[in-house]
Amino acid sequence: MSSPEANDCCAQPSQGKDGFICRGESPANTANIKSPATPPAVRTRILFVDDEASMIRVLKMGMRPMIKEWDLQFAESGEEALALCEQQPFDVVVTDMRMSGMNGAQLLNQIMRRHPQTVRIVLSGYADLSEVVSCVGLTHQFLTKPCSLEDLKNSLKRVTGIKQQLGHEKLRELTGGLANLPSLPKLYLEIADALQSPMSSTERIADIASKDPALSAKLLQLSNSAFFGFSRRVFSVAEAVQLLGVGVIQSIALAVPLFSAFDHKKCPGFHLEQVWDHSVETGVIASRIYNHHLDDSHRAEQAFAAGVLHDVGKLILAEKLSTQYADILKEAHALKRPLHEVERKHLGASHAEVGAYLLALWGLPVPLVEAVACHHNPRRCANHDLCLAGVIHIADSLQHAASAEPDAIPSLVDVEYLKYIGMETDYEIWRKEHSGKKRDSV
């Protein structure tokens, strides 16, 4: 049986106006971040760190075929690795965990602080939960030894390709340096209480977490990590909680912050409650489309997760570019323009690309990443049928149309896309079904 990723992948991103690399217009006024000129092509720089000389020799031999594409460097200690990073930052650092002197977690902590744009990967042979816990928030992905050289190459090819999906170095730096995402204060307290309670069940934790973009993303990152050895990709938060187990989640949550409470004063005009409500409702609508109209309960679970995650980029921009993003929100409201268009005008990318970049760094399944990336531009899918990104696009527009929020920024459906997939009539049925509905309670 083919995997869901094989059946529902969007096309690789183009580099034009509607692609991941979106230069946008030059802002009329000088902004904090401007879209840069296209830089000259440079080889990806990858640093391998391991204090076992034999492992370094294996890596040098195994990676030799890639020297035309990658600039490869090797270090036998954390101290040596940091010195090399200070000379010229690397695109990717792959490090062992247990090393004499500076261990892997300490090294990654320094790299995250000094070079947040660097993709950080752990390659370790020690299945010690406490050591993995120390890396949560510091590492983007966790690979386990033994790891075949071919699997390692493929993982590095995927992760090096991620950098090309967001064509702005500053945005990559801000996103790559994130250890967690902000959540609603009330939900933060609710999940914290549930995780500290010895009576908590997987069902209760999954019910709370599945409604929050921040915690959903983090649990999907952990459950898709190679460390836990699950044989399949994990698409739903309920499945992630079931597989990880309450004990593992409690251990991680007590040791490191899985998510943080959002400070509303940081970004005037940004209402996390509205984003939270909209995301959950979009997930509900997307799930309903699959369940009731397309008769596909398996994809319905993926659709709910994708709906909850589709605006995660807004959390990143509000958290990391608070003042500038408040101005962008104000302009979008004043002009009644779609927010993603105003974001692209001033930042060179929208919340869709920023959110997809983080989820890709965290190793989430490709269909979820692409649904987030393409939810405003579903025609980028190389599929004449309705794919996951298209369902999220439709659900997003339906929710906005039915929203009771007086200051909601419009998000219109792409009529040409509906014609392309031959679903104009279906959309009208769904629109009438959701028009004037009160918000779903979830």
Image (cartoon, rainbow, N blue to C red):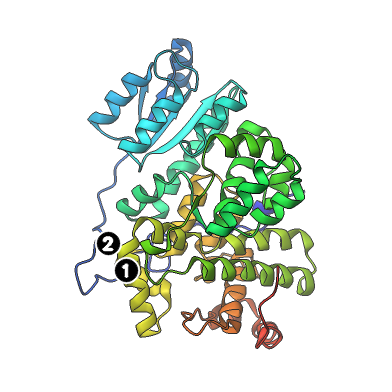
Label 2: few (<14), some (14–19) or many (≥20) C-alpha neighbours in 10 Å: many
Q: Nearer the viewer, residue 104 or 412?
A: 104
Q: Is residue 138 above or below residue 207?
A: above
Q: Secondary structure at mark 2?
A: loop
Q: Nearer the viewer, residue 143 or 407?
A: 407
The dot on residue 194 is: none
Q: Position of residue 167 (x, y in %)?
A: 35, 56
Residue 390 is at least partly visible in this image: yes
User: Which residue is nearer to you in this view: 347 or 426?
Assistant: 347
Q: Residue at x 52, y 48 (%)?
A: 259
User: In x, y percent, where is residue 65?
Assistant: 44, 28
Q: Would you call the spot at circle 1 few (<14 residues within 10 Å), some (14-19), or many (20 or more)?
A: many
Contact, CB < 8 Å: mark 1 with mark 2?
A: yes
Residue 381 image position (x, y, % from top left): 56, 65
* Residue drawn at x 58%, y 52% as measured from the top left: 189
Residue at the disc numbered 2 = 35
Note whether residue 23 is visible.
no
Q: Amino acid at mark 2?
A: Ser
What is the x, y in percent for residue 420?
A: 59, 78
Residue named by callout 1: 24
**Residue 167 vs residue 312: left or right?**
left
Label total for image: 2
**Residue at the location (65% across, 52% down)?**
5
Q: CA separation, marks 1 and 2?
A: 7 Å
